[in-house]
Amino acid sequence: MSTHRFTCHSIALPLSPLIDGGRIGEGTVLGSSPTAAYLAFDDVVVALTARTVPLMPNGAAVIESDGLDAFEAGAVVRASSRGVRAGRVEVIWDGAVPVDLAVPLNEGHDARAVARRGSDLLGALGHDADPFAAFAGACPELVAGDGLEAVRLLFTSLTDGVPEVAREAANLLTGRGPGLTPDGDDLLAAAAATTIAFGGPTGLNSGVSERLRAALLVDELGDRTGALSATLLRLAAEGQVIDPVRTLLDLTAERATWMRALIRLGRIGHSTGGTYALGCALTTLVLAGSCKSSHVNQLREEKP
């Protein structure tokens, strides 16, 4: 039987220290599809993606367009500075180019520019009315039961800068929803990354921002949600995000550029891309002060 060999062309910067230091050793294949494979090494998940899929902050992208389902779930995978191998499947990454997926800090911009981006994003998503009512309609599984209250608490914590409220929201949202990356985790990741990108232009105190982001990471995160989602959430709290999200949060990006990123983001997962996009848009508006407190409070009354 021949070896399935893939060649990596780019690798997210957060993985570089692990690879260079030879720290990721032996792991397990969590699962795979033709365009993605997820490899678990202790509490770190590496996302191998085809060139048609956006690079993830924990990821390495191969030049091939598919075939990654050759990785079998449960198989032992061994990694080194040269690449990874699981049975007869091999990815060579020693020539890959490191890519920094850190969100921009948008220095030199102000809250009005942030508000415009939030409004434009929301409009591009087809939500021109009350943004929080739009959220309730767009994510019915997430807001079912006490989920709507959790979303309200999240945006209240950002409006008021109260980490204790953010922690309460995170406890309700973490692991909420189906899939490898539940909607609740995607929303928390989007909020954390957006807070980094737009905290400066909107005047959010850096210390408060740091405490808010820390509060969004619940204790024993790896026990509360899946390994992939926990990895992405931790990275988002550090400002490392899926490639298209970085573009959405870049105020120097022209409309045509971020619109292409929005379309590409929307193709990720069953609901992941959409939740990220809406979470970024609403967090942007909240930070810019363009969402009235009455809108936040109105979430109590919205029905999923």
Image (tube, rainbow, N blue to C red):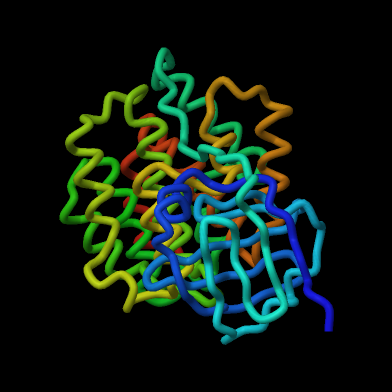
In the rendered image, residue 248, in percent from the top left (x then y), is placed at 57, 36
Identity of the residue drawn at 32% across and 54% down: 154
Q: Residue 6 in the image: x percent, y percent? A: 74, 61
Q: Residue at x 74, y 64 (%)?
A: 35
Where on the picture, by quarter, is residue 37? bottom right
Horizontal relation, residue 183 to residue 17: left or right: right
Residue 177 makes an appearance in the image: yes
Residue shown at 77% from the left, 53% from the top? 52
Answer above or below: position of 197 versus 237: above
> For this rendering, which residue is in front, 66 or 169?
66
Residue 205 image position (x, y, % from top left) = 21, 30
In this rendering, the answer to whether 51 lies above or below 239 is below
Q: Nearer the viewer, residue 70 or 155?
A: 70
Q: Is residue 179 above or below residue 254?
A: below
Please indicate whether residue 210 sits to the left or right of residue 33 in the image. Answer: left
215 in relation to 197, above or below: below
Answer with the quarter of the image where residue 203 lies: top left
